Amino acid sequence: MISVPSIPSIRLLIGLALCLLSLGVLAEAPAPIRVGVLYWSMQIPGQVAMRQGLEAEAARINRRAASQGLPQVELLAKVAGDGPEGIERQIAQMKTLVAQQPDIIIVQPTDNAALAEPLLAANAVGIPVVAYDQYISGGRLAAYVTSDNRQAGYLDGEYIADHFTDQRPIRLVLVEYPHVSSTVERLNGFLDALDDQGQPYRILKAYKAVQPEEGRRVGEAMLRDFPEPGSIDVVFAVNDGGGLAVVEALEAAGRDEIVVASIDGDPKSVRRIANGGLIHIDSAQFCGPLGAEAMKTAYAIATQRPHARHLLVPVFPVTRHTLDRYPGWLGPIPGPFDKPWKAENPTWDGQLRALQ
C-alpha cells in the first residue's frame, strides 16, 4: 500500500522549498560565461606557458564560482599557428567567433593590424575583446594585458652598456620583428637604454625573426654576412622564439666572442646563462601570470567588476648574478632587489602596473 503525504505535510514541504529558494540553496546555477580564446602559437614555448597560466586561472575561477554560486567560464579555444598562414587563420577564427556571439573574447594577436576588421565587427555587436601579449591597431579593446616590453628591452640595454666600455661604438646586430607591438617596444627600450647610458653603438645590420625557422635562416645569413670572428660585438634578439635558433647557429660556428642579449626567458636560454654561454642576459616574461591576468581581467569585465584597461606585467632580468632569484615562467613574481650593474633605477621592484 502506497502512503500518500497528508495535505499539511505537502504544505510544509512546499514552504520549506520556497524558503530554500529564497536563500539561494535550490537556485539554478547561473549560466556559464562563454569566453572565446584565440591563441597565437603552440610552437613558441613562452606562448604555451601563457596558455597554461590562462587556463589554470580559468580553472581557479570555476572552483571559486562553484562554491559561491557565481557564473563559471566556458572556454572556446582556437590556435592560429605560425607564419602568414597563422595570421590569415586567426582573422577567420575571430570572424567565426564574433558570429557565434560569445560573452567576451580573449585574443593573443598574431599581427597588430590584421585583426582590426574582426575587432570592429566585435565592437559593432557589443562583444568586449581583451588582447594579451600583443595590441590590435584599430577598433576598441575592452582591456590590454601585456608584459612590460619596454622594460624588457631597457634591462637588456642597461646590462650591455655596463658590460662594454665607452671607448668605441658597440658593433651591434639586431634580430627584430616590426609586425607586433611587443617586439617593437622591446627594441625601442633596448636602444633607449644604450642612449641613456651614453653607450655609443653602430647597427651593422637588422634581420627579422620571431619563430624558430626564421631564426635558423637568420643565423645562416648572419654567418655569411659577418664571417670574421670579432666582427660583431653584440646580437640583440627581440625574443627567444627566433633568437635561440640564431644562438645555435653562432655556437655551431664557434663564435663565442659574441655577447647575446635576448628576451622571453626560455629555459634553454636560462641554461645557457647558467653555463656561461653566448647569452649574457635574457629579460624573462612571467608568462603564466600574464595569461592569468588576461583571464582575470576578462572575468571582471564579463561580471561588470572594476578592472584595469591597460595592465603591464613586469619582466625579470636573468643573468648569472640573478639566476637564484628567478622562479621561471610560471612565477610567482619575486620581491625587489638591487640590480648588480649600473642603472638609472638601481632597484628591480616587480610590480604590476595599471596604466588606465
Image (cartoon, rainbow, N blue to C red):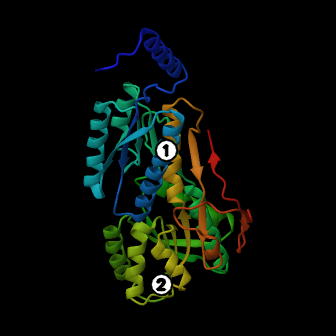
- Residue 317, compared with residue 31, is above or below; it is below
Circle 2 SS class: loop
Residue 112: x percent and y percent? 41, 47
Other-residue count near label 2 (Cα within 10 Å), few / some / many at <14 / 14–19 / ≥20: some
Q: Nearer the viewer, residue 283 or 256?
A: 283
Which residue shows up at 41% across the image and 49% down it? 108
Residue 209: x percent and y percent? 38, 65
Which residue shows up at 63% across the image and 75% down it? 324
Circle 1 SS class: helix
Other-residue count near label 1 (Cα within 10 Å), few / some / many at <14 / 14–19 / ≥20: few
Who comes first in sequence, dot 1 or dot 2? 1
Residue type beneath disc 2 = Ser
Q: Quadrant of the N terminus?
A: top left
Residue 347: x percent and y percent? 73, 64
Q: Name the residue under label 1.
A: 63
Q: Which of 319 and 114 is in front in this view?
A: 319
Q: In which quarter of the image is the C terminus?
A: top right
Say which quarter of the image contains residue 188.
bottom right
Residue 355: x percent and y percent? 62, 42
Q: In this view, does 126 lie to the left or right of 155?
A: left
- Residue 127, compared with residue 169, is above or below; it is above
- Residue 48, compared with residue 29, is above or below; it is below
Which residue shows up at 39% across the image and 68% down it? 242
Q: How many marks?
A: 2
Q: Name the residue under label 2.
A: 231
Residue 263 seen: yes
Residue type beneath disc 1 = Arg
Q: Is residue 177 left or right of residue 353?
A: left
Q: Distance between the residues labelled 1 and 2?
A: 57 Å
- Residue 332, compared with residue 33, is above or below; it is below
